[in-house]
Structure formats: structure tokens, C-alpha cells
Image (tube, grey):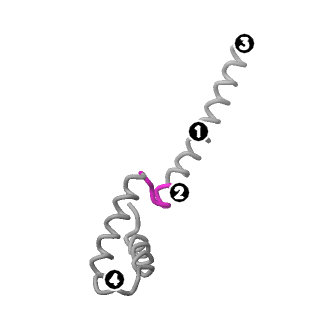
Amino acid sequence: MLDPKILDDIAGKITSSLPEGLASIKKELDKNIRAGVESGLSKLNLVSREEFDIQSEVLARTRQKLEKLEQLVADLEAKNS
């Protein structure tokens, strides 16, 4: 899930770039733009940096285990040859 602060920042940047005549409905626009941005980003199937880092660590550990197992298999095959 994306950080709500990031969504607020994106919505704020969009609404601040709107003409001043729309300032009276700024709060309403902020809410609608935030909902639209959140909806659009959720469709992208993104992960947080924390989730990415965790999965990277899991992958690194899995690779290490795989390398050890490959070496073990190679050693066993060498003994049986």
C-alpha cells in the first residue's frame, strides 16, 4: 500500500497547478484527485519499498541456499562417479 502522505503530496501538486478561480472548490478537488490518483496507482499493482526490500532479502537467502545445495549435489555426484 502506498504511503497516504505521498498521495496527498501528488494531489496537492495537481490542485496547486490549477487556476486560482478553482480555489473555492480546492478541498473538493483535492479529495477527488487523491481518490483518482489512488485508484490509478492501485491498478498498477505496485509494492512499497519496504516490501521490495524484504523480498530482495528473501531472494538473496534463497539464492545462497540454492548455491549450497547445487554444490552438495555436485559433491555427491562426484563421489558416486
Q: CA distance from mark 4 to mark 2?
A: 41 Å
Q: CA distance from mark 3 to mark 2?
A: 42 Å
Compared to residue 24, the image places residue 14 above or below, namely above
- Reading the image, the residue beneath label 4 is 22
How far, Cα to Cα, is label 1 from label 2? 19 Å
- Looking at numbered disc 4 in the image, what kind of residue is underneath it? Leu
Give the class, few, some or many, for how many residues have Cα within 10 Å of label 3's Cα (few <14, many ≥20): few
Q: Of marks 1 and 2, which one's residue comes earlier in the chain?
A: 2
Q: Which residues are magenta?
A: 45-52
Q: Nearer the viewer, mark 1 or mark 3?
A: 1
Q: Check residue 81 in the rendering and tell me which mark sits there, or answer none.
A: 3
Q: Which residue is mark 1?
A: 65
Tell me how far mark 1 sits from mark 3, CA to CA: 24 Å
Residue 77, given in percent of the width and then of the height, sits at 68, 18
Secondary element at tag 3:
loop
- Amino acid at pointer 3: Ser
Q: Nearer the viewer, mark 1 or mark 2?
A: 2
Q: CA–CA distance between discs 4 and 3?
A: 80 Å
Circle 2 is placed at which residue position?
Answer: 53
Indicate whether residue 48 is drawn in magenta.
yes
The three-letter code of the residue at mark 2 reads Asp
Residue 28 shown left or right of residue 17 in the figure:
left
Tag 3 or tag 4, which sits nearer the N-term? 4
Residue 57 picture location, percent across and down: 55, 51
Residue 25 is labelled as: none
